[in-house]
Amino acid sequence: MHTGCESTIRFVPAGVNEGISFTRTDVEGCPKIPALLENVVDLNRGTTLGIGQHKIHTVEHVLSSLAGLEIDNVVCELDNIEPPIVDGSMKPFVDKLLEAGIVEQEAEKNYLVIDRPISYSEPDRHIDIVVTPSETIRITFLIDYKNPALGTQYTSLVNLEEEFVEEFAPARTFCFLSEVEALREQEIIKGGGLDSALVIVDRELDEAHKAKLRKLFNIKEDLFIGKTGILNDISMRFYNEPVRHKAADLLGDLMLIGMPIKGHILAARSGHAANVALAKKIREQYEKTLLSKKYTGKAAQGRDFMFDSVAVMNIMPHRYPFLLVDRIIDLEPGKRVIAQKNVTINEPFFEGHFPGHPIMPGVLLIEALAQAGGFLLLHTLEEPEKKLVYFMSIDNARFRRPVVPGDVLRMELEMMALRRNTCKISGKTYVDGQVVTEATFMSVIVDK
């Protein structure tokens, strides 16, 4: 479609839990490129995967076909840089996969279960996507282009097994006539044509423009605007074919998470970039769930925090009376952490600081902030329970107001730099939304 190359794709069986990957048979030493979010290198009018200098363009139709047929493990071998576009739909891939046959493997199928709503939006582009809990994968999609040939279109995929092959796989990709020249001049849609996409008419088509389009795309036949609003009056396979294709594209992009999801996706005006952004949010939430489950024995479902005090002690070396973190509210490993400490009158330091006028010592406020930072740092390691964090320096420490019994400390820290076994972390402590302490730390990781 975009590169204009001729190619052949071959689907090869893969082992249990090997997942979906692409490889180039025309390039010696080309590695397998797993179909995962971290390997997405471009989202301009399609999804491109790459590792190093090796790239494979426009993989979304292949991924959608595999997702629709619920295939988990396969190697997609290509002899060029982009899969064939064929008729612009998923049907050619689906037909070949069904012809080859699908084998059930001796392993439990893994799903990413959505247990809480996750959303993504781009207000300036009127894009909104929400994923809510569901026992199966479901998609509800809306488009509302300001064009008479399309207008507002809606579709809903309720049962993947029963609906995908006949109701969604045949839906073809589309673009607008006003876009065609600009896209071609951007060195994309080099392989596009009237046999591989629906072209929606949204501008006048004079003789000069016809001649230019025929030359750009090597079209032999005449070009005309008919009654359907589709260039050359090409018939739609469904009354809402464009939105069905959008839903199928979304299904393919979500495969980049690494496993199928159980959730209901409600999308409005979404495209590949937004789909991938949503997939990243879903996987981020999933990774947090795995972290919570690893140290607590269960996922933090229905709670407003990730790690309780027991889980904190499974990672942190500190103990009474010097453990100053009660909960981890949120964590992005290697990036940021939000921790909580409940300050009570029973704290041992209040007995002497100060009698009759209890105030939490500033040095302990710094220590609590530092411990939260240590938790963040330890989570960049494979085996955090075997390591300790030593602090090398404390800079720009500030105390804004006293902390007294009954206060709840909310400590927010960000990783500013991480090089080998040293890092720089900056953080602030809040009480009731007001900053009470802030500081920047340099620290080093050592073995216990």
Image (tube, helix red, strand yellow):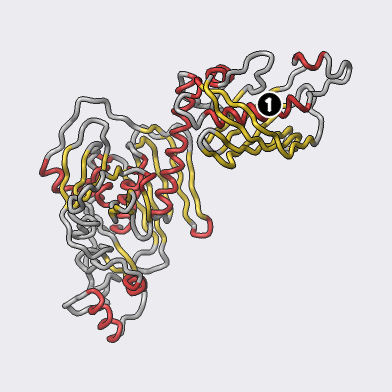
For the point 51% across and 29% down, the residue is 379
Q: Nearer the viewer, residue 33 or 170?
A: 33
Q: Quadrant of the N terminus?
A: bottom left
For the point 22% across and 41% down, the residue is 69
Q: Nearer the viewer, residue 369 or 64?
A: 369
The kind of residue on which mark 1 rests is Ala
Q: Left of 49 or right of it: where is 281?
A: right
Q: In x, y percent, where is residue 162?
A: 23, 40
Q: Nearer the viewer, residue 385 or 125?
A: 385
Q: In x, y percent, where is residue 429?
A: 70, 34
Q: In x, y percent, where is residue 90?
A: 22, 52
Q: Is residue 57 above or below residue 181?
A: above
Residue underneath mark 1:
368
Q: Is residue 105 above or below residue 196?
A: above
Q: Is residue 44 above or below residue 10?
A: below
For the point 39% across and 55% down, the residue is 271
Q: Left of 214 or right of it: where is 292?
A: right
Give the SS element for disc 1: helix
Image quarter of residue 294: top left
Q: Nearer the viewer, residue 79 or 188?
A: 79
Q: From where the camera sits, is residue 282 visible?
A: yes
Q: Among all residues in the image, which is located at the extreme bottom?
A: 207
Query: How many numbered marks are there?
Result: 1
Q: Left of 85 or right of it: where is 327?
A: right
Q: In x, y percent, where is residue 130?
A: 46, 44
For the point 35% across and 70% down, the residue is 186
**Disc 1: CA contacts within 10 A as few (<14), some (14-19) or many (>=20):** many
